[in-house]
């Protein structure tokens, strides 16, 4: 069954990493039709030219939602990994989707992502060199009704990946893996 797996979370919270690891795990479970719409990648293609104002962020999210919907309604699992900071925009995409919409909150704290600072952006944002930076000088509205929450500030990538797969199983969107011979006593 196809669905939209929609990651949301601060920059560096692990959205891209988990989109890739979940995608790999789903392929290993036989899901062949799957696309990842990564936030950074989308901004160089369908959202090229958009900035980080409230309006441009909204446009970016609605475009990602539109493409994800087209994929999902044609039997392809769509995994998105954009910050998507506004509840209103996420909920609009959710409401428009005919395929199941699964929101995954990558819930690392600002302290954790700033400490990690994978792309060196928080240092610049705190120094005022980047404006409108989510979590520092721009809002991030944490979801209150995400189907799956992963504590990416404390969990390992493997733990968060497992949690998401178990969440999808619990929602009936993927089958639980059959026990392999190695797993049997
Ligand atoms: P985002 O796409 O949210 O901006 P990235 O996936 O680019 O974030 O970066 C997240 C970083 O955090 C990576 O370096 C990743 O290895 C690390 N990390 C540590 N623990 C986790 C976890 N549980 N889930 C995802 N990423 C994690």
Image (cartoon, rainbow, N blue to C red):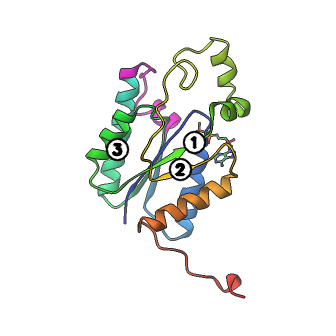
**Sequence-wise, which precedes: disc 3 or disc 1?**
3
| Badge 1 vs badge 2, beta-carbon distance below 8 Å | yes
Q: Which residue is mark 3?
A: 67
Give 45 or 38, whichever is nearer the viewer: 38
User: Which residue reaches farthest top?
Assistant: 128
Residue 175 highlighted magenta (yes or no): no
User: What stretch of residues is rendered in magenta?
Assistant: 39-55
Give 6 or 74, whichever is nearer the viewer: 6
Real-space CA distance between mark 2 and mark 3, rounded to the nearest whole angstrom: 24 Å
Q: Which residue is mark 2?
A: 149
CB of residue at label 2: within 8 Å of ligand 1? no
Residue shown at 57% from the left, 63% from the top: 25
User: Residue 158, percent across and down?
Assistant: 67, 57
| Badge 2 vs badge 3, beta-carbon distance below 8 Å | no
Foreground disc of the pair 2, 3: 2
Real-space CA distance between mark 1 and mark 2, rounded to the nearest whole angstrom: 7 Å
User: Residue 177, percent across and down?
Assistant: 55, 75
Please indicate whether residue 73 sits to the left or right of residue 84 in the image: left
């Amino acid at each position: 069954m196809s669905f939209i797996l929609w990651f949301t979370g601060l920059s560096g919270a692990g959205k891209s990493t988990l989109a890739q690891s979940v995608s790999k795990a789903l392929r290993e479970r036989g899901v062949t039709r799957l696309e990842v719409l990564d936030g950074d990648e989308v901004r160089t293609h369908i959202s090229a030219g958009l900035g980080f104002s409230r309006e441009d962020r909204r446009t970016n999210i609605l475009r990602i939602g539109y493409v994800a919907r087209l994929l999902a309604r044609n039997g392809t699992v769509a995994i998105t990994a954009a910050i998507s900071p506004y509840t209103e925009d996420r909920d609009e995409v959710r409401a428009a989707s005919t395929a199941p919409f699964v929101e995954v909150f990558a819930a690392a704290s600002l302290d954790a992502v700033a400490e990690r600072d994978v792309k060196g952006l928080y240092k610049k944002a705190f120094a005022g060199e980047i404006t409108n930076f989510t979590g520092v000088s721009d809002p991030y509205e944490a979801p209150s009704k995400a189907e799956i929450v992963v504590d990416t500030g404390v969990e390992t990538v493997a733990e968060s990946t497992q949690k998401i797969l178990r969440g999808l199983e619990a929602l009936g969107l993927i089958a639980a893996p059959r026990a392999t011979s190695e797993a049997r006593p």
